[in-house]
Amino acid sequence: MSLVNFTEITVKSTARLHMGFFDLHGGLGRKFGSIGLSLAAPNVELLAMRSEKLCVSGFASNRAEEVAKKLIAKLNLTGAVNLKIKQNIPEHAGMGSGTQFALTIGTAISQLYGLNLNTAQIAELTGRGGRSGIGIAAFDQGGLLIDGGRVSHAARSHASKVQPSQATLTNLKVPPLIARYDFPKDWRILLILDNNQPGIHGEEELAAFKTLPIFPENLAAHLCRSVLMQAMPAMVEKDLAAFGYSIRELQMYVGDYFAPAQGGRYASKYVGAVLQHLETLGVACHGQSSWGPTGFAVFENEELAQKTMLELKMKFTEPHLTWQICSANNEGSEVLRA
């Protein structure tokens, strides 16, 4: 295995919103199906160099070291890397930090050692993309993203006696990207973060899925229709009201389905109170990203987002609530070589 000429790689990627699953029933042979959005901030950024021994510094260095060790072992590399983590996405906040972290490290190693790994291969090597392909597509392309879920062993015909809850997912591919749109440049996303409460993740997340009941088939059909006939055309027509209606439908049904695991429709009662207030204000698009606790709201322009954020800050004064306005990222990750 020969080394390439450059010796230093900078990889930058950004957070994503997971706006909801639209088929948690899985009776057609595929389960989950996600819609999500790549954000321009917060960011993960790292500097990587070839090294004889693994050396990691900066943000979340322990986590980065675990990922790098796994990759070096699986790829049978004789060398290692020196990683400096310059920025990181808040961990366990529902913004996809684990996936972006793994993909940035994997991309850096692949580039330094001339491995030519694609993002899906890095995701599988690092155990990412188990249910959703949004983070992987966000790393590659950015934008508003819709994936087709994971193939399951549930039979694809009415003759099947396999219940959706018994269906096991195959471990062959990350969920395929089935639609992608540029998110309108003028629209702004307000992030509402609860820094005092982590979202469900890891073993707790796995256990939560195992204890949940079968998702009603009629609701899964309704949500699939909502995504296909509301959210997707709304992106083409830049219709925030129609897009927001579809997202709120996902948030309502999926949030209530996950309520036994996360303690309510929203994981954080403080973020939940803000989102309920946004509902009373008539804000078109809002919800919780993934398992939370991060909440989001989408506005048609910067001025309206700033005005609403200031009003919310005056009403909701809990010290562990923080706020951030950002745009969408329609470009995907960035790799700089030296």
Image (spheres, rainbow, N blue to C red):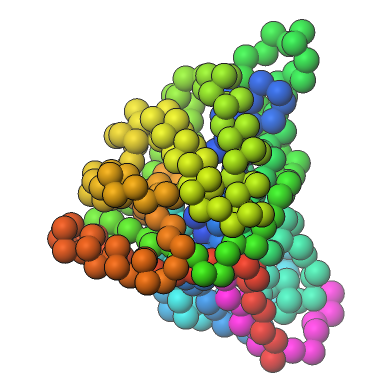
Left or right: where does residue 26 sit relative to residue 305?
A: right
**Where residue 235 appears, x then y in whole percent?**
62, 53
**Where residue 209 appears, x then y in whole percent?**
48, 31
Residue in view at x 67 percent, y 79 percent:
335
Q: Which residues are magenta?
A: 1-14
**Looking at the image, how many numbered discs can be counted on the residues?**
0
Quarter of the figure that contains the C terminus: bottom right
Is 15 within the magenta?
Answer: no
- Residue closer to the observer: 217 or 263: 217
Q: Is residue 155 above or below residue 233?
A: above
Picture quadrant of residue 320: bottom left
Q: Is residue 194 above or below residue 325?
A: above
Note whether residue 326 is visible.
yes
- Residue closer to the observer: 147 or 280: 280
**Where residue 185 appears, x then y in whole percent?**
56, 70
Picture quadrant of residue 156: top right
- Residue closer to the observer: 141 or 236: 236
Is 6 within the magenta?
Answer: yes
**Where residue 116 appears, x then y in whole percent?**
80, 69
Residue in view at x 51 percent, y 81 percent:
84
Left or right: where does residue 130 sit relative to residue 192?
A: right
Residue in view at x 72 percent, y 55 percent:
120
Residue in view at x 80 percent, y 82 percent:
3
Quarter of the figure that contains the N terminus: bottom right
Note whether residue 62 is visible.
no
Left or right: where does residue 137 sit relative to residue 294?
A: right
